[in-house]
Every structure is written in C-alpha cells, then in structure tokens.
C-alpha cells in the first residue's frame, strides 16, 4: 500500500512522499570539500538550532497521531514561485488545453490526500528567497536570505562566518543511512533550490569560482565544485538539470552553442571530474544522450542540458539539441533510484515557473506548472 502526502505553500512548495508500508588535478593551495566539512559523525549539525528544535517538537507532537508506517522512498516536488493563484490558473489552463471544463478540472497534485499551507519567511526578511526557503525545506532551519545550507549565524557574503553554521540536509542524512539520492531541476543544478540539497554557501550566487570577491570568498568552495565533491555517503546517484557553464572552463566551447563557453577560471573541468570518479559515472548533454542512457542500471548520471537554465516548456521543442521534459527526467530518476533496496530521497524542481513570473509571462508560467504536474502524475503512476 502506498501513502502520498502533499504540501503546497503560497510561495513555492509541493511535496510528495511515496513508499511501501513495510518497509584535472586540484591546485594544492585550495581547500577540498571534505577538508572544510565538519565531522559528520553527529547528525544533524543543526540539532541545537532554535528553529530546528521548534519544528522538531511540532512534528513529534503530530506523529503521536495514528499514522501509517514510514515510507521507504521520499520525493520532494518543488514548484519555485508556484503559489495558490498559479495553481488555480494552471488548473484552468490544463483543463482547457485538453478540451475539458477548466474550472472543474483537477491537476494530479490536487488529487493527493493531504494539503497544507506554510508561512514562508526567512530569518531576516518577511519575503523570503529560494535559497533560504529551500534550506528550510531540507534542513528544518530558517536562515538568512540568499544563503544556502547554513544557520542564521552566517553573514551574507562572508566566507569566514560559515564556520560552525553548517547543517545536515535531508539528503545528507539519507546518504548516512545508505539511501540513494538524486536531484532533478529545470533550473541550473547550482541554482538555489537544487543547491540546497548539498551546498553550504554564504551567498547563493557563488555558483562558480569567478563569483568570489576579495578576502570574503577566498577560502570558499564554489557551489558547482561542492556538488561534484559532495562528501556525503557515496554521493548522488543521479543529478540532472541545467547549468553546464558552472562546471566547465572559460576556454571550453559549449557542446551545443558554438559562441558560448564555460565560466570557470580555475582550469577545473568538473564534468570530466565527475566522469573520472568511476567507470559508472557518466555525463549527458542532450536528448540523444538521454535517450541512449540505461537508467535501469548502476550508472551514476550527471545530466547538464543547457549552459544556464533549461528551456521553458513552451520553448523546449525549439531547442537545437533537444531536451527531455520534466516528466521524462522524473521517470528516469525514479527508475535509477528504485534500484536501491534501502530506498531513496529525490528532489524534483519545476524551477522556471518563478522565472516566468519574474518576466511577467503568464503563458510560460502556466505551461511550466502543468509540466511539473505531469511529472507528479508520472510519479503517481
């Protein structure tokens, strides 16, 4: 028997949990991710944080109710920028595009048995950003806006202030327990929401090594490198989205766009670093590579389908090299992670809903919302 739980906030979140009822050489003068990571023997690092303790007490109280046995697998769907009004409009849009009565149509996410609203604010702002809210989602603590994976004692843009402010995310805790982990996003994999699963950064914009300014960032490790060198367990089984430019150097021509290059200045080709980890590690860049990949295998897959964010759903068919849909990415990720006997934790983000809203583009926002809903429907199948 499968149990499903959903939570939608007025700003960005849909969550779902599914499961069975039973059940290039590195320069020597720069730090490694492992060397700057705190001892992970005591998990989680944020256990004494007041925000965490308050939330833990609330959850413990609710769990005293008669709940079904724990789920084996957890899938966290995030619609960045997807509030209630977006869901309402997307419902009508989806129904009408299918020739149905839009007002009475139901999105797949609306068929889940539980729903809740959440107050979204950060430690220092009433209107939070994706970095602080995503950190709250995966670590249980509220933190300063524009910071990632750190507690509220961090100072924005100050690398030294990260010391002692780390958290252990849901994904790190899962790795510590032997579960498989994965992330899928239509945004850059180094963007705030997906990066919250693995990165500790005093600024969300430190996506590659060129982002650091002065002494404040001189000892920091950029977000892309943190993903490749993530020390939790045996690392991600699968990570797919956009953001090639953050992983490749400024001397490397992009594999899809002749006039574009990577952004890194430290000579590190992080795509090659991923592929060099083992014979099972592989990198894919386009629809053809995606179609040729056996996801029902022990392959460790890094998919980077655009230099920056992936295409909006309305523009995806015009992409020169082709891109898989979010539903296709979801199916592939679930196929790969389902090979884990211990279970898995997976984040799937429709990251471009927010970008469309920022641009005042309702058509793209609604199309990307329905694309996320198609991914939810696929996961429920």
Image (tube, grey):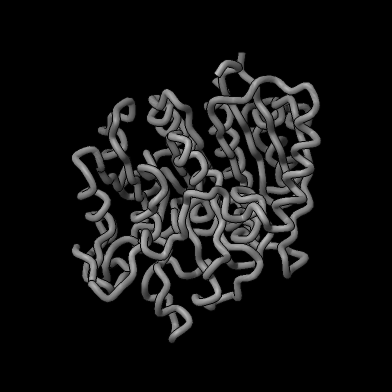
Instruction: Say whether residue 222 is left or right of residue 358.
Output: left
x, y percent for residue 123? 72, 65
The quarter of the picture where the N terminus appears is top right
Q: Nearer the viewer, residue 365 or 126?
A: 126
At 55% from the left edge and 38% from the top edge, which residue is drawn?
371
Which residue is most to the top?
1
Q: Nearer the viewer, residue 326 or 297?
A: 297
In the rendering, at what x and y percent does residue 12 appear? 67, 50
**Height in image: 62 above or below 54?**
above
Which residue: 37% across, 49% down?
319
Position of residue 277 relative to residue 5, above or below, is below
Give the image quarter of residue 170. top right
Figure label count: 0
> Residue at left 78%, top 21%?
66
Question: Is residue 95 shown to the viewer in this render?
Answer: no
Percent from the top left, x then y, of residue 150? 58, 62
Residue 34 left/right relative to 95: left
Residue 205 visible from this viewpoint:
yes
| Residue furthest bottom as drawn | 214
Measuring from the top left, give residue 308's x and y in whole percent. Answer: 41, 60
| Residue 359 falls in image quadrant | bottom right
Indicate whether 246 appears above or below 19.
Answer: below
């Amino acid at each position: 028997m499968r149990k499903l739980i959903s939570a939608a906030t007025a700003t960005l979140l849909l969550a779902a949990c599914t499961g069975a009822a039973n059940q290039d050489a590195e320069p020597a003068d720069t730090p490694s991710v492992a060397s700057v990571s705190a001892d992970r023997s005591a998990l989680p690092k944020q256990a004494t944080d007041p925000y965490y303790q308050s939330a833990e007490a609330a959850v413990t109280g609710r769990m005293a109710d008669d709940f079904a046995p724990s789920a084996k697998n957890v899938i966290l769907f995030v619609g960045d920028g997807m509030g209630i009004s977006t869901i309402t409009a997307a419902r009508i849009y989806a129904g009408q595009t299918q020739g149905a009565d839009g007002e009475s149509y139901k999105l797949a996410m609306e068929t889940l048995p539980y729903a809740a609203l959440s107050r979204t604010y950060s430690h220092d702002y009433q209107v939070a950003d994706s970095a602080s809210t995503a950190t709250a989602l995966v670590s249980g603590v509220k933190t300063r806006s524009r910071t990632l994976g750190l507690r509220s004692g961090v100072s924005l843009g100050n690398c030294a202030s990260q010391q002692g402010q780390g958290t252990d995310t849901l994904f790190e805790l899962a790795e510590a327990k032997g579960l498989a982990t994965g992330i899928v996003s239509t945004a850059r994999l180094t963007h705030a929401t997906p990066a919250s699963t693995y990165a500790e950064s005093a600024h969300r914009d430190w996506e590659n090594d060129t982002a650091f300014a002065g002494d404040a960032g001189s000892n920091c490790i950029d977000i892309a490198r943190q993903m490749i060198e993530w020390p939790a367990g045996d690392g991600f089984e699968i990570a797919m989205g956009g953001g090639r430019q953050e992983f490749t150097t400024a001397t490397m021509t992009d594999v899809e766009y002749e006039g574009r290059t990577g952004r890194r200045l430290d000579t590190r080709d992080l795509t090659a670093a991923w592929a060099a980890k083992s014979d099972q590690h592989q990198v894919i860049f386009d629809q053809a590579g995606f179609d040729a990949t056996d996801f029902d295998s022990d392959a460790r897959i890094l998919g980077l389908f655009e230099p920056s964010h992936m295409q909006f759903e309305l523009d995806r068919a015009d992409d020169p090299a082709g891109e898989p849909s979010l539903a296709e990415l979801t199916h592939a990720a679930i196929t790969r992670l389902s090979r884990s006997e211990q279970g898995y934790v997976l984040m799937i983000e429709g990251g471009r809903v927010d970008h469309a809203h920022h641009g005042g583009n309702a058509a793209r926002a609604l199309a990307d919302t329905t694309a996320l809903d198609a991914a939810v429907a696929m996961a429920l199948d």
